[in-house]
Image (cartoon, rainbow, N blue to C red):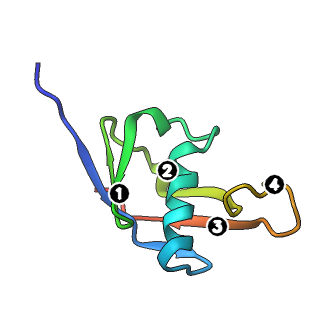
């Protein structure tokens, strides 16, 4: 049986973040409880998402709430981030 993998570029995160904050947003996406694909995906650096299941059109935008490590997600410092990428 062949393993088919799907590769997606993480094009834009709004509001824009870079460096460690971008890496944190990607990590939050990977561990997001509401993401139906989280057990089937990994990221390569901070720019590529690889999944064993093809993402549907509903996955064009995925919302995650940003919080620093150890911060409460519902706290005043948490911010809404949106990851957008083209579907391939």
Q: Which residue is mark 1?
A: 87
Query: Badge 3 is on which residue?
Result: 81
Image quarter (top left, top right, bottom left or bottom right) of the N terminus: top left
Q: Who comes first in sequence, dot 2 or dot 4?
A: 2
Front tag of 4 and 1? 4
Looking at the image, tell me whether mark 1 or mark 3 is earlier in sequence order: 3
Which of these two is toward me, 13 or 71? 71
Quarter of image, res 87: bottom left
SS at badge 2: helix
Badge 3 density bin: few <14, some 14–19, many ≥20, Cα 10 Å: some
Q: Secondary structure at mark 3?
A: strand
Residue at point 47%, 74% (across, down): 12
Taking the spot 71% from the left edge, 66% from the top edge, the residue there is: 80
Q: Are marks 2 and 1 in contact (CB under 8 Å)?
A: yes
Mark 1 or mark 4, which is nearer the start of the sequence? Answer: 4
Q: Position of residue 13 (x, y in %)?
A: 53, 72
> In this view, which residue lies farthest toward the top?
1
Lower position in the chain sequence, tag 4 or tag 3: 4
Numbered badge on residue 72: 4
Q: Find disc 2 in the rendering and name its residue.
A: 59
Side of 47 relative to 70 (left or right) = left
**Residue located at (82% from left, 69% from top):** 77
């Amino acid at each position: 049986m062949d393993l088919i993998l799907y590769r997606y570029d993480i094009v834009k995160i709004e509001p824009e973040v870079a460096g460690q904050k971008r890496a944190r947003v990607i990590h939050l996406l990977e561990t997001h409880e509401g993401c139906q694909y989280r057990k089937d995906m990994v990221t390569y650096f901070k720019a590529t998402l690889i999944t064993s299941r093809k993402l549907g059109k509903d996955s064009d935008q995925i919302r995650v709430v940003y919080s620093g490590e150890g911060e409460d997600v519902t706290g005043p410092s948490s911010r809404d981030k949106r990851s957008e990428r083209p579907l391939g």
